[in-house]
Amino acid sequence: MGCLLVLAGCGQPPEAGAGTCGAGRLGGWIGQPATALDEQYLPEEHRLVEPGMAVTQDYRPNRLNVLLDRQGRITGFRCG
């Protein structure tokens, strides 16, 4: 029974891509190199996430995750 309680807390937060980080307004940058994304468009709390990179799993609705491919191009944005 204890295992069920532990597993119940392991799921992603509801709507992990939704939040208040502004990810929705940055879709036009997808496919561009990360270096082209001017810091002025990014919230104070952001991180660049490369393939295979270890990142913390804590959910922060105000943090913008900039998802990159192996060539350093932007593949998407997520709050969290």
Image: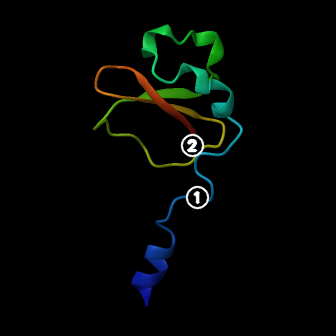
Q: Is residue 53 left or right of residue 43?
A: left
- Which three-letter amino acid code belongs to the residue tagged 1? Pro
**Residue 26: image x %, image y %?**
62, 25
In this rendering, is residue 1 above or below 66?
below
Query: Which residue has dot 2 on it?
Result: 80
Residue at screen point 34% across, 28% down = 69
By what rule are the colours in the image chosen? rainbow
Q: Residue at x 43, y 44 (%)?
A: 56
Q: Is residue 68 above or below residue 52?
A: above
x and y percentages locating residue 54 in the rendered image: 33, 39
Q: Quadrant of the C terminus?
A: top right
Pointer 1 with pointer 2, Cβ within 8 A: yes
Question: Whole-percent x and y of residue 15?
Answer: 62, 54
The residue furthest bottom is: 1
**Quick check: 16 above or below 31?**
below
Among all residues in the image, which is located at the extreme right? 20
- Return the residue nearer the eye: 38 or 69: 69
Residue at label 1?
A: 13
Residue nearest the viewer, comparing 54 with 29: 29
The 10 Å Cα crowd at callout 2, few under 14, some 14 to 19, many 20 or more, is many
Which callout, 1 or 2, points at the residue further toward the start of the chain? 1
